[in-house]
Image (cartoon, helix red, strand yellow):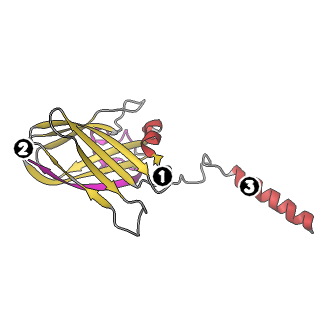
Amino acid sequence: MMKKYLLAATAMMFLFASCGKDDPDIPPVPELITTLNYTLTPTNGPTVILSFQDIDGDGGMEPTITGGTLSANTTYSGSMELLNESVSPSDNITEEIEEEDEEHQFFFTTTVAGLTLDYSDVDENDNPVGLNSSLVTTSAGSGTLTIILRHEPDKEASGVSDGDFSNAGGETDIEVTFPIDVQ
């Protein structure tokens, strides 16, 4: 009788060991992104950091979102940082996106007139990623900037390489809307 339980337990162990993360029948588990920092460094003037933090993930406590005030007629270099701060030490999700850049793309949408964004980085297939960007302001105004990270988008679909996510497909890893003022 004990032999049957031992045999069954051993078989189950091999079954679970064979179901790894590379198994195509098992959908990937998305990384928990608790923190997104979008650092905007101007050619002249103070650096602005747009920040999202939700340590407990979806549900529970409300996230903390910090928007920013940008200067009119200014060009900013943007860099993205993503973390999972629910574990100690925190996981740097940015590094994973850099390693798997062909499977990720950031999309930026804004309601601020006179604010434009361009990609400053590409994956090995010469498609945009968005960990680095260029943000340009022209006139004063206010509104929002939404940042969306898509996992496994169709980067060859119409408009996707220009930042249009409507045809991108894939799954949204994180989507954050920041309040923006341009003065």
Number of callouts: 3
Q: Classify residue 16 by image quadrant.
A: bottom right
Name the secondary structure under disc 2. loop
Q: Does residue 162 lie above or below 63 as drawn?
A: above
Disc 1 target residue: 31
Image quarter where the N terminus lies is: bottom right
Q: Amino acid at mark 1?
A: Glu
The percent coordinates of residue 50 (x first, y second) are 26, 49
Name the secondary structure under disc 1. loop
Q: CA distance from mark 1 to mark 2?
A: 38 Å
The range drawn in magenta is 154-183
In front: label 3 or label 1: 1
One can see residue 85 in this view? yes
The percent coordinates of residue 168 (x first, y second) are 36, 47
Name the secondary structure under disc 3. helix
The percent coordinates of residue 60 (x first, y second) are 41, 70
Q: Residues within 10 Å of mark 2 (few under 14, many from 20)?
A: some
Is residue 86 found left or right of 121 in the rendered image?
right
User: Does the segment drawn in magenta span residue 171?
Assistant: yes
Between disc 3 and disc 1, whose residue precedes?
Answer: 3
Residue that appears at 30% across and 55% down: 176
Disc 2 target residue: 139
Q: Residues within 10 Å of mark 1 (few under 14, many from 20)?
A: few
Q: Amino acid at mark 3?
A: Leu
Disc 3 target residue: 15
Residue that appears at 36% across and 48% down: 149
